Amino acid sequence: MNIKNKMFAMDDDHGNRLYMRVFIDENDIQTNANLYLKLKSEDKHRQLGIVDFQKRTFYCKRNSNKHLHLKTDSYGFNWNILQDPFLGIDYVHLTVDEEHRYLISKTVISDLGKFLNFKTQGFELQKFVSNKVLRKYNLKKDQNDIQSDDVNPE
């Protein structure tokens, strides 16, 4: 049971701010964190996902109508989050359009993903992974690795 939480924030070189609410249990162990991004060019923040510290997994959702990069048929992942030593992420659990689920290692994203430069439009550094790569890491309907109902794509 979580009994307290702490807020953290970090700015990137382009004026974007990453917020994190870390939840701590009765044994003073960090259990999970909700991650949010406030782009310099926008007035509101977006929920990026949830980190489960015990599973070392970042859970996120994407809506293909909003998040699919059509030219490369890929989805972007915030590179600062994946590389952050405090978060210690080893895996990304991605839910696309509430029906397709993928579990992909950070190593695969690092090795097979591609940086696309959108900083002139105010976006954070992202590494994009193609649907062709993601399909290799598809979870079957009966694989119940996560509860991701609290993660909403913005």
Image (spheres, grey):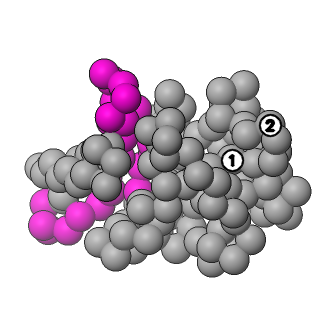
Residue that mark 2 sits on:
70
Residue that mark 1 sits on:
75
- Amino acid under disc 2: Leu
Q: Which residues are magenta?
A: 26-51
Instruction: Left or right? Give the position of 3 relative to 23.
Output: left
Residue 146 visible, this angle: no
Residue pictured at 32% horizontal, 43% vertical: 16
- What secondary structure is found at the residue carrying circle 1? strand
Residue pictured at 34% horizontal, 48% vertical: 14
Residue 96 visible, this angle: yes
Label 2 packing within 10 angstroms: few (<14), some (14-19), many (20+):
few
Q: Which labelled disc corresponds to residue 108?
A: none
Which of these two is toward me, 67 or 151?
67
The numbered mark, 1 or 2, whose residue comes first in the sequence reads 2
- Amino acid under disc 1: Tyr
- What secondary structure is found at the residue carrying circle 2? loop
Distance from disc 1 to disc 2, alpha carbons, whole Å, reads: 9 Å
Which of these two is toward me, 14 or 35?
14
Instruction: Left or right? Give the position of 39 relative to 8.
Output: right
Q: Residue furthest top?
A: 43
Q: Is residue 44 magenta?
A: yes
Contact, CB < 8 Å: mark 1 with mark 2?
Answer: no
Quadrant of res 88: bottom left
Q: Position of residue 33 (x, y in %)?
A: 31, 53
Q: Position of residue 31 (x, y in %)?
A: 29, 61
Q: Position of residue 60 (x, y in %)?
A: 54, 46
- On screen, residue 104 above or below 98: below
